[in-house]
Amino acid sequence: RELDISISFSTFYHGDEYPFDGIGNEVAHAFYPSHRKRRGQIHIDDNEPWGPNGRNLNWVLAHEVGHSLGLPHTMHESIMMPQYGGFEEAKPHLFPYDIITIQQLYGKKKGFDEMYALKRQNEQVEIPEAPSLCDGKPIDTIFAFPNGTMIVFKGENFWMLGNLGNTSAEGPFLIHDFFGQLKLPIDAAFTDHLDWTWLIKGDLVWRVDASADILRLFAPQELHEVTPFSNYIYNSVDAVLSINDDVSHTVFFFLGPKYWYDGNSDGDTDAGYYRQIKEIDYRLKKVDAAVSLPDGNFIFSDDSYWKVNPARNSLKVEKGYPRSLSNNWFRCQ
């Protein structure tokens, strides 16, 4: 019989996509019930100083069990707060918000104290919806790591997604749990021809090394300080399409109603002028995200996506596009 919840102590790389990092930072993680392969798993960093003079294992385990049962982080007074100030207490305890939210998912225990229920029945507690790719809200960005793993950022969560032939999404996972203290929401992300992944928010950019098993996030830099934007004249970007094949390293930048071709990987237009995004498709007002995958190059706007091919200094749409992102890629129906 499959276990409902399993708890293991590990160090550094331990078989999933999220290696631990030694003492400090991430101390544990758990997988939501929606995760196909690892639901119910709780992984604890064995390098942490657990015990009376270190971290409180009881509180951390209670928090991670909440994730395993399907509870996200919350800013209410709850055991599911990202950082709770009462962890110095020896034994964890549930708050009214925890009880109400778990009962929303699984129902009340038989023999539940009716006096307690009567006391709480008039409380107005806002129950957050579980994060979903199918809630109708737009994504923030899509990008792919060098190994082909595709990542979807949406709010404070992310999902791992396959290519068009393998569209099952794994997640949601909290961005801050695995990517550190990024400023959210992220505006754009892409992987360049040197296998560096870049995460961009306004005029700040984070460089990510995802070429090995351990994800490494570097300190943020100003946009113009990094090579892909060394001749970039703006302070933000909506999307970047970096086409990294054996023939060339073609890059297209998107900002507002315009886009441009960059063959030198410095952010400037090599053509000497900008093109209008509506030239790609008259229905396009702006591009929210772009990604280059083994099965094609794609740009995204709201709930639609287009498969495009470079044609000299411009992009041309393949026949049969646009298509619905939620229906054709996320399989929401």
Image: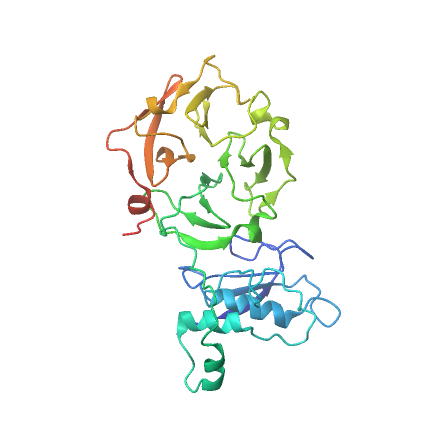
For the N terminus, the image quarter is: bottom left
Q: Classify residue 291 as left or right of residue 76.
A: left
Q: Residue at x 73, y 72 (%)?
A: 52
Residue 115 versus residue 59 in the image, above or below: below
Q: Is residue 57 shown to the viewer in this render?
A: yes
For this rendering, which residue is in front, 181 or 4?
Answer: 181
Q: Is residue 247 shown to the viewer in this render?
A: no
User: In the current view of this chain or complex, which residue is farthest to the front?
Assistant: 122
Residue 297 versus residue 87 in the image, above or below: above
Q: Residue at x 43, y 23 (%)?
A: 259
Residue 279: image location, x then y, percent? 33, 21
Residue 46: image location, x then y, percent? 64, 64
Residue 190 versus residue 173 in the image, above or below: above
Residue 45: image location, x then y, percent? 62, 61
Q: Residue at x 31, y 51 (%)?
A: 332
For this rendering, which residue is in front, 278 or 314?
Answer: 278
